[in-house]
Image (cartoon, helix red, strand yellow):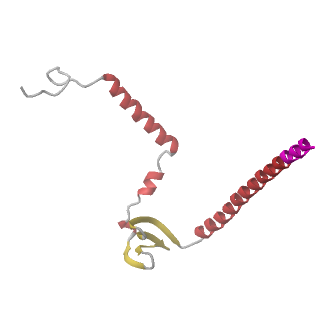
Amino acid sequence: MLFLLTEGTRFTSTLELFGLVIVFIVVVAACYFVTRFVGGRQLAQQRNSNFLVLDTFRLAQNKYLQLVQVGRRYFVIAVGKDTISLISELEKEDITWWRESAQSGAGFSGILASIRKKQTEDSGRAEDGPEKEEDGSDGPKLPQ
């Protein structure tokens, strides 16, 4: 009689564990789809907006300088914990477009190829051994 009670408890525990795993999977899937939905809506709102934050520079905790494009005009603003202040208006010619030049490269494969090339060059130098000094010695001259 005790054996049947113990066996039933194991079965019930296994069933409860299986149910918890299924509930966990459902919650994670719901979080994933809700996040994608909300992110998609926010992205659509940003695409149809006249406001665009081009760059952000952190000065201190909760204090930033931001370069903002509003229509065809560019502004530098200071953003604090409770305040936003206009610092300056810039012309398009005053802005360095470093992101465009960085993004116009070959992409990930180009960057990876350049890193591999640099590593092979560095390892080739290491295999050549230490460079010889002009007098043929292996290192710097020591005072005598």
Magenta segment includes 38: no
Q: Residue at x 59, y 67 (%)?
A: 47
**Residue 132, relative to residue 53: is it above or below?**
above
24 horizontally vs 130: left or right: right
Residue 7 inside the magenta-drawn segment: yes
Q: In the picture shown, does residue 136 fall above or below 51?
A: above
Q: x%, y% of residue 137? A: 17, 21
Give residue 79's position: percent from left, percent from top.
Answer: 43, 74
Instruction: Look at 87% across and 43% down and name the residue there.
Output: 7
Q: Main secondary structure of the magenta part?
A: helix
- The stretch in magenta equals 1-11
The quadrant the C terminus occupies is top left
Along the viewing direction, whichever of 7 and 59 lies nearer the viewer: 7
- Residue lying furthest front: 2
**Quarter of the figure with the N terminus:** top right
80 vs 16, left or right, is left
- Residue at 58 percent across and 68 percent down: it is 46
Residue 88 image point, x, y percent: 36, 76
Rendered position, 56 above or below 78: above
Residue 42 in the figure: left or right of residue 20: left
The number of callouts visible is 0
Q: Which residue sits furthest right?
A: 1
Query: Quadrant location of residue 40?
Result: bottom right
